[in-house]
Amino acid sequence: MMQGGEPAEALTAIFRRLIANHGPISVMHYMGESNARYYDGRDPLGAGGDFVTAPEISQMFGELIGLWLADMWIRAGRETPVHYVELGPGRGTLARDAIRAAKRYGLEPGVHLVESSTALKDIQLANVPNAQWHNDLSSIPPYGPLLIVGNEFLDALPVRQLVMTEQGWRERMIAVEGERFVAIAGDKPMDSAVPEARRSAEPGTILETCPGAAAMAYEIAGRLVEQGGAALLIDYGHDEPRTGSTLQAVREHRKIDALALPGEADLTAHVDFSALAPIVQSRGCRWLGTVTQGHWLRQLGIEMRAESLSAYAPEHKDAIHAAKDRLIGEGQMGALFKVMGLAGPNWPDGVGF
């Protein structure tokens, strides 16, 4: 498979050479480089890709997000101009569905997509023709409320892993052993990087942090405080501190060894929502809560929406209800996925939290 003008397997060779010349690389370096390569030149979504996200499962997902944003905006006073901002918008499916639903209630925002993948931008253009593209939040207009959505965005940001050894905390590194990449403990003491309350742990304990997710939460909170608005961050993860590695790789809808095919599989880690809430609040932003996706979608009326869609298109009733169950089922996406709500200081509480 060609990617970006060179064979995709080149990243394995680059890592091998780097490690041979300079020693092991951090898990964070490995994950960051792998995902940058992976996302740059392909559409990873759908049946022909590597994974499926909630907006691709059912239009109900994006519609309910659009209704939530419209409800927040209306109750906050309908200020204009207002901007819809989506982080890592995939194919633009969620944006298309959310904006269509919001328009019924008078919300017609400017559309801003934060995307680095050249392959996905072309697909997004077809779904959201009036969008503007950005590499990050810094070029988003600095005036008017922001309605920010990040669905399965934070999980792809590189994590740093620290492991407790007999000698104390060390960074988890990637080394080469024969033909394989393996995880080892680094040689530099890292105790100062671990919060004091969590320093005493059994050897072998792994702590994960995500500097990118922390920075993004900090920046979103600052913008909501300055400009007003609300945000939904939706991802799989946990709302209480945990230990252990959650790094995983998915290729062709199957989990594979996370160290097997750098740059050719989607690498993700669980989002630690418990670490993000205090960051947001430190800026004076409102944390509305973190709840399971199943709870949130039920509160917004997904079951009634499924019934009305089924009545409108009875030939699709089974598919509509199967999609609903996949989104809210405890054993499917309902419990593992979390929804975190944020709002500017003078903005109202949000439905579902």
Image (cartoon, helix red, strand yellow):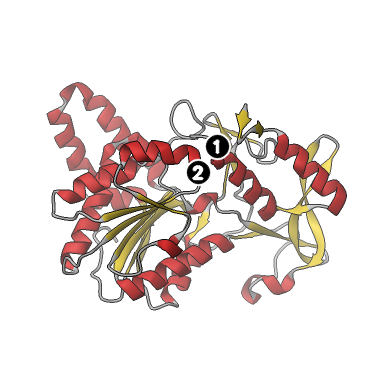
Residue depicted at 47% across the width and 25% down the height? 48
Check whether the beta carbons of the residues at disc 1 and disc 2 lie within 8 A of each other: yes
Three-letter amino acid code at the position of disc 2: Ser
Residue depicted at 50% across the width and 35% down the height? 44
Which of the numbered marks, if any, corresponds to residue 147? none
Is 284 situated above or below 305? below
The residue carrying pointer 1 sits among few (fewer than 14), some (14 to 19) or many (20 or more) residues within 10 Å by Cα, namely some
Q: Viewed as shown, does residue 52 lie left or right of 108?
A: right
Position of residue 159 measured from the top left corner of the image (x, y, whole percent): 61, 56
Q: Is residue 301 visible?
A: no
Three-letter amino acid code at the position of disc 1: Gly
Task: Give the quarter of the image for residue 204.
Answer: bottom right
Q: Is residue 33 visible?
A: yes
| Secondary structure state at the residue bearing disc 1 | loop
Position of residue 100 measured from the top left corner of the image (x, y, whole percent): 21, 44
Q: CA distance from mark 1 to mark 2?
A: 7 Å
Q: Which residue is mark 2?
A: 117
Position of residue 253 measured from the top left corner of the image (x, y, whole percent): 52, 30
Q: Which residue is mark 1?
A: 41
Is 190 situated above or below 204? below
Out of 72 and 33, give the one closest to the viewer.
Answer: 33
